[in-house]
Image (spheres, rainbow, N blue to C red):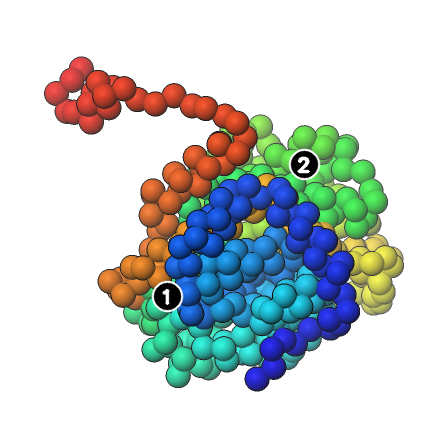
Amino acid sequence: MKDYVIRDIGLAPGGRLKIDWVKAHMPVLNVIRSEFEKDRPFEGIRVAMSIHLEAKTAYLAEVMRAGGAQVAITGSNPLSTQDDVAAALAAGGINVYSWYNATAEEYHNHILETLETGPRIIIDDGGDLVGALHNERKDLVPNVIGGSEETTTGVLRLRALDKAGKLLFPMIAVNDALCKYLFDNRYGTGESVWSGIMRTTNLIVSGKNVVVMGYGWCGRGVAMKARGLGARVIICEVDPVRAIEAYMDGYRVMNSEDAAPVGDMFITVTGCKDILRGRHFHRLKDGAILANAGHFDVEINKPELSDASVSRRVVRKDIEEFTLPDGRKIYLLGEGRLVNLAAGDGHPAEIMDMSFALQALSARYMLENGGKLQNHVYDVPPDLDRRVAQLKLQSLGIEIDRLSAEQDQYINSWNHG
């Protein structure tokens, strides 16, 4: 098989500069890299990765290789791969199978080519590697020790497999770790979504009605940043507890059909499908902007949007205009894919430093313990979560208090008042 399938190896120097930049801003991962270089825990172990292939992911791949791993990597979204970064990894000896704007067939072939390397450890984002192993390449499963999953959508897929009794190897839900969702999902998604929207549209957010559809940790972050930018924020939810939380957090809460004619910008961030569809499109105001921050491009129903329109055209990079029969225009960003990566650079390096540190440590944990685990979805061990937090505090020069022996005994005893 080929060592790499990319657009242009000549783009490598530009990609190397990007990787070096994020490396300088990922101190936690740098500590782990030093440990890996010393211990070489993955010596001779093949690792397959499917994560949005940009500079921060590339550095994680290099950290794994520093630990002795033979790394093969592909993207987890057709529009998030940066070709210069892919070229830099390939030039450095990592197997890369990905390019920007891949067709559905090309994207799927890249997944299969990555698996063709025969991985023992999987690092997934959205569940496409795991899905292909279960559906098309079961012959490779006996070689797999286990792996980890980066995002909410992928964890949902894994838990469905686990519930059905069909998960073929153990997986760690990195997405559900405190040092992932409290920071990556909330602050990372919030900042990167608005960075992508603003640089793509070149429009102001302040004063606009922003409808955030979904109030999980990602939705909380998107809403918080929108309010910070001066928007009037509306939340749509199906979970009554989250809806009350949004209300108590000071947002207006509405059902989606009532919000449709009110909103200027809509951001879907649920992990589900058909959040915005035909019944909404017919009620949108002229000039409404639609963006998705969920993993797959199914939250905004693109076929129904196309059917509702009499014409469509690209009016600016990553912006497609749909004209309705009455002349109203609706604008879709990034083809309805993850707007923060399809139309941006993704989460800030300092945020992904924590998430990818968890990925690296979880991969090592799986390598050392996978043989003892059953085929289920596991949480990140709490000591790994705490270690990442401690390393992050250390990198920031922050010292915190510690319990005295007497305090520790007090809170762990039942007979004190």
* Residue at image coords 72%, 30%: 230
Image quadrant holding the N terminus, namely bottom right
| Relative to 157, residue 216 above or below | above
Determine the residue located farthest toward the top in the rendered image: 417
* Left or right: 181 in relation to 159: right
Q: Nearer the viewer, residue 288 or 17?
A: 17
Name the image quarter holding residue 85: bottom right
Disc number for residue 138: none
> Which residue type does callout 1 highlight?
Gly
Residue 397 pos. (x, y %): 52, 27
Residue 186 image position (x, y, % from top left): 55, 40
Q: Secondary structure at mark 2?
A: helix
Q: Quadrant of the C terminus?
A: top left
Going from N to C along the chain, the mark reached first, 2 or 1, is 1
Q: Position of residue 96 (x, y in %)?
A: 61, 71
- Residue 160 falls in image quadrant: bottom left
Residue with the mark numbered 1: 146
- Element class at badge 1: strand
Q: Which residue is mark 2?
A: 226
User: Is residue 260 shown to the viewer in this render?
Assistant: no
Q: Position of residue 289 (x, y in %)?
A: 76, 50
Residue sitting nearer the eye, 122 or 374: 122
Q: Is residue 415 shown to the viewer in this render?
A: yes
At horizontal 76% and vertical 58% (from top left) the residue drawn is 14
Q: Amino acid at mark 2?
A: Ala
Look at 58% across and 68% down and name the residue there.
Answer: 94
Q: Are there few (<14), some (14-19), or many (20+) residues within 10 Å of tag 2?
A: many
Dot 1 crowding, Cα within 10 Å, few <14, some 14–19, many 20+: many
Q: CA distance from mark 2 to mark 1?
A: 38 Å
